[in-house]
Image: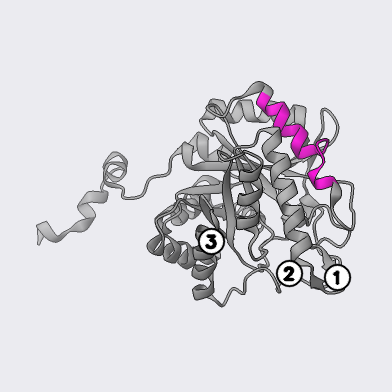
Amino acid sequence: MEHNRLSKMRSHTALRDLVSETHLHKDQLIMPFFIVEGTRISDPIKSMPGIHRISSDVLVTEIGELLKLGVRSVLLFGVSSEKETLAQSAYRADNIVQKSIRTLRRHYSSDELCIITDVCLCGHTLNGHCGIMKGTEIDLEQTLDILAKIAVSHAVSGTDFVAPSAMMDGQVAVIRNALDDNKFHKVKIMSYSVKFASNFYGPFRDAYGSAPQFGDRKTYQMDYRNPGEALREVEQDIMEGADVVMVKPALAYLDIIYRVKQSFNIPLAAYNVSGEYAMMKQYASESGVPEKDLILESVIAMKRAGADMIITYFAKELAQWI
């Protein structure tokens, strides 16, 4: 019967766009950057085609281009050449992240640009782990103390969000208390609440210099077999003061994104991670599938699952396509 032909609503592009149920906006995109010391540096990352380690002067230019395209949020990772047992350089005022925040703030206010800064130890420790190790075990108390120091140093420099990614028990509460004790009540926390011990992080570790030198991170990052535990992690972070929660990676964990969004009324970020980026880049280059179509399909899936915002290395391209 004619009236049952649902395909009649798919007959042309303008109509399909008119009745589409899921929408992706430029304001929902967050672009990650890898920042290094120096000037005029743009060092290609071999395992992430199109992505570079850049110095803060180049960062200013890159962000200017992003803003013109309508992307107003960035996530900063400082690539450090200083590796220390206690990661002391991570919370120094002259660390590349802190300096980059101050540089950006000289050019852009919070109304113009939302700055999010990763808070972890893996890029600063000698062993590449996300916490201070005593033998093969995490020293939780010492790790939490250093994470809090990093968060406060980022707040002093002018960040809008700190994003603790170490997956340490109690990290959100300790950071929230430290921020409040130092009068940074308006600095928000975007917590990596559900960060799985995933095989999709390889290119990021190349870019960031953060591969663990022994063992793995399965004792503190999440087991991918445990969706119920993911919900408990999110609930705990909300109770401790998280303003935004995150699921990482995204594509293999769309069910987790959906469960979190159905269970909690809080802004939810999905991190479209480096391995996902690299795979899509390679598949598009080798298969003949248009890269635009592949990326849009993948990112819309994250939105459809329930993500309110997407952290993606494709942010610049997406902003041009939306």
Is any part of residue 130 visible from this angle?
no
Which is nearer the eye, 48 or 77? 77
Which label sits on residue 247? none
Q: Residue shown at 57%/40% (left/top)? A: 185
Q: Amino acid at mark 3?
A: Leu
Q: Position of residue 29 (x, y in %)?
A: 52, 42
Sequence-earlier tag: 1 or 2: 1
Sequence-earlier tag: 2 or 3: 2
* Residue 97 inside the magenta-drawn segment: yes
Callout 3–callout 1 Cβ contact below 8 Å: no
Q: Position of residue 145 (x, y in %)?
A: 75, 56
Q: Amino acid at mark 2?
A: Arg
Which is nearer the eye, 273 or 48? 273
Q: Position of residue 30 (x, y in %)?
A: 56, 42
Q: Residues within 10 Å of mark 3 (few under 14, many from 20)?
A: some
Where are the magenta residues, as a range? 89-105
Quadrant that contains the C terminus: top left
Residue highlighted by disc 1: 134
* Residue 26 inside the magenta-drawn segment: no
Residue highlighted by disc 3: 251
